[in-house]
Image (cartoon, helix red, strand yellow):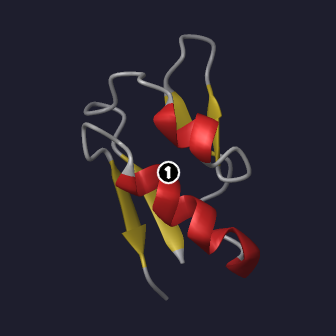
Amino acid sequence: MKVELDHERCQGHGRCYVLASTVFESDDDGYGFAVSEDIAPDDEDAARKGAGNCPEDAITLIES
C-alpha cells in the first residue's frame, strides 16, 4: 500500500497523525505528512483509520 497526502487540501486538523502515528506525523505548522510513501503491512489498518478520518479527504491510499 502507498499513501499520498494532498498538502493543498490538508487543513491541519491532526486526525491522521493522532489516530495513526506510525504512518503520519505533524510538521512544524501542525499539518500532516506521511512518514513514508510506502506503508508497511502492519500499518495498513492504521493508515486506513487516519485516511478515513481526514475531514478534507486529503489522504489517498493506493492498494498494491
Q: Kindly identify the amino acid type of the residue bearing the numbered disc 1.
A: Gly
Rendered-image quadrant of the N terminus: bottom right
> Can residue 11 be seen in this snapshot?
yes
Q: How many marks?
A: 1
**Residue annotated with mark 1:** 50
Q: Is residue 13 above or below residue 4?
A: above
Q: Is residue 24 above or below residue 37?
A: above
Q: Residue furthest top?
A: 29
Q: Quadrant of residue 52?
A: bottom left
- Position of 44 compared to 42: left or right? left
Q: Secondary structure at mark 1?
A: helix
Out of 55 and 6, give the one closest to the viewer: 55
Q: Residue furthest bottom?
A: 64
Question: Which residue is painted at 41% across and 24% down in the image?
Answer: 13
Out of 52 and 7, give the one closest to the viewer: 52
Q: Position of residue 21 (x, y in %)?
A: 70, 44
Q: Is residue 43 above or below residue 19?
A: below
Question: Which residue is painted at 42% across and 54% down in the image?
Answer: 51
Q: Position of residue 5 (x, y in %)?
A: 41, 47
> Can residue 38 be seen in this snapshot?
no
Q: Is residue 43 above or below residue 23?
A: below
Q: Position of residue 32 (x, y in %)?
A: 52, 32
Q: Residues within 10 Å of mark 1 (few under 14, many from 20)?
A: many
Question: Which residue is painted at 48% across and 64% down in the image?
Answer: 48
Q: Position of residue 49 (x, y in %)?
A: 49, 58
